[in-house]
Image (cartoon, helix red, strand yellow):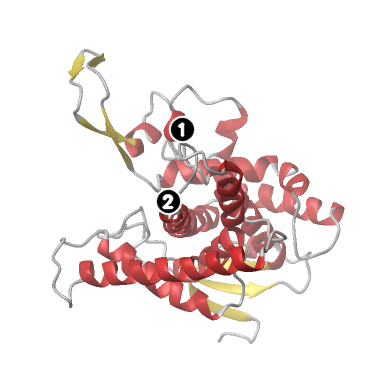
Amino acid sequence: MISEKTLILILVSYLVQITFKAMCRMLMSLEDDPKLQMLQEDITHVCEAMLAFPIRFPWTRFCKGLRARKRIMSTLDLIMTERRRCSQGNQKDFMQCLLVEDEKSGSDEAYRMTDTEIKDNVLTMIIAGQDTTASAITWMVKYLGENQDVLDTLRAEQLHLAEKISPGPSLTLEDLAEMPYASKVVKESLRMASIVPWFPRLALQDCEIEGFKIKKGWNINVDVKSIHLDPNLYNGPNKFNPTRFNDDSKPYSFLAFGMGARTCLGMNMAKAMMLVFLHRLITTYKWKVIDSDSSIEKWALFSRLKSGCPVQVTRIDNRKDDTSAYGSH
C-alpha cells in the first residue's frame, strides 16, 4: 500500500517536463506562461518528425512536425517583438543575450544575426537539451539504485553540503563547486549511458587514421558508445565506478559532449542541471526503481530507457532515515 507521501511515476516523462521548463526559463525567462504547454506539445511533434519519413501528407508525423515548427517560430517571433517594443533589458537570459549582441553589431552585416538565426538557436538549444538531459538523469538514478555503495558516498557528501549552505530554493555556482563526488557520478553516468551514442562528422580533407585512408567529403560516424566501453581506455568499463575519474581521462576517451570546435554548447548547463537534481533528490527523497530493465527505445533520438524507469518515490521526513532505503530495489 502506498502512503500519501509516496508517488509512483515514470521518471523519464516527469524529467522531460522538468528539463523543458528549466530550459525555457533559462533561455527565454518563460515561467507559468500559457505558451509553455503549447511549446512543449509542438516541440514533441518536431522531435517525432526528425525520425519520420519525409512525406508531406497532412496526417504524417513529418508534416505535423513542419506545422509545429512554424507555430514555434511564430511564438518566438512574438516574444522577440515584445521584448524589442518594451525594451525588456532587465531579463538576463539566452534570448536577451542574442538580441543585445544583435543590436551591438549595428549595421555590420558580417556579424549581425538574423531573427531566423536567433530563433533557430533557441529552438536548437531546447530540442538538444531537454531530452538528452532528461535521459541522462534517468540513467543516473537507475545506476545509483543499482550501486548502494556509490549512493551512500554521494548521500554523505550531499547531506554535508546541505548543512553548510544557506536554506533557499536555489543553489549557487559556488555550491555546485562543492560537489566533487557528485560531479564524478554525473560523468560516470554519461560515460556508461552514452546518451548520444554516435556523432556524424564530415572529413574536410584526405587523412589516414590507424592505417585507414579517409577521403575528403566522406561522412564519418564516431562510435561514442564503443569508445566509452573500451577496456583499453577504462578498467572494468561495464562497472559503475565514479572514482575512475579521480585521475584525468585519456585524450578523446570521454565524448559525452563531443570534442573540439563541435563541443556541445549546453555542456555546462546540462552538468549544472544534473547536479542540482542530484542534490534535491538525495536530500529530500528516497526512491526505489521498480523496473531495472536496461532495454533502449528503438525509435528515439538518444539512448533512452524503453521502460521510462518507473520509480517509487517517498519524501523524507527525517534526514537520518536508514540509508539502506535509498535507491534500493
Q: Is residue 236 left or right of residue 183?
A: left
The residue indicated by pointer 1 is 254
Instruction: Say which element carries label 1.
Output: loop
Figure check: 129 above or below 108: below
Say which mark, if any, is on residue 198: none
Kind of residue at disc 2: Glu
Can residue 259 be seen here? The reply is no
**Residue at the spot x=58%, y=62% of the render?**
28
Task: From the viewer's side, name the closer residue of 92 and 26.
Answer: 92
Q: Residues within 10 Å of mark 1 (few under 14, many from 20)?
A: many
The residue indicated by pointer 2 is 117
Kind of residue at disc 1: Phe
Counting from the top left corner in percent of width and height, residue 59 is at: 17, 77
Task: From the viewer's side, name the closer residue of 84 and 246.
Answer: 84
What is the quadrant of the N terminus in the image?
bottom right
Counting from the top left corner in percent of width and height, residue 80 is at: 54, 64
**Residue at the spot x=31%, y=57% of the render?**
296
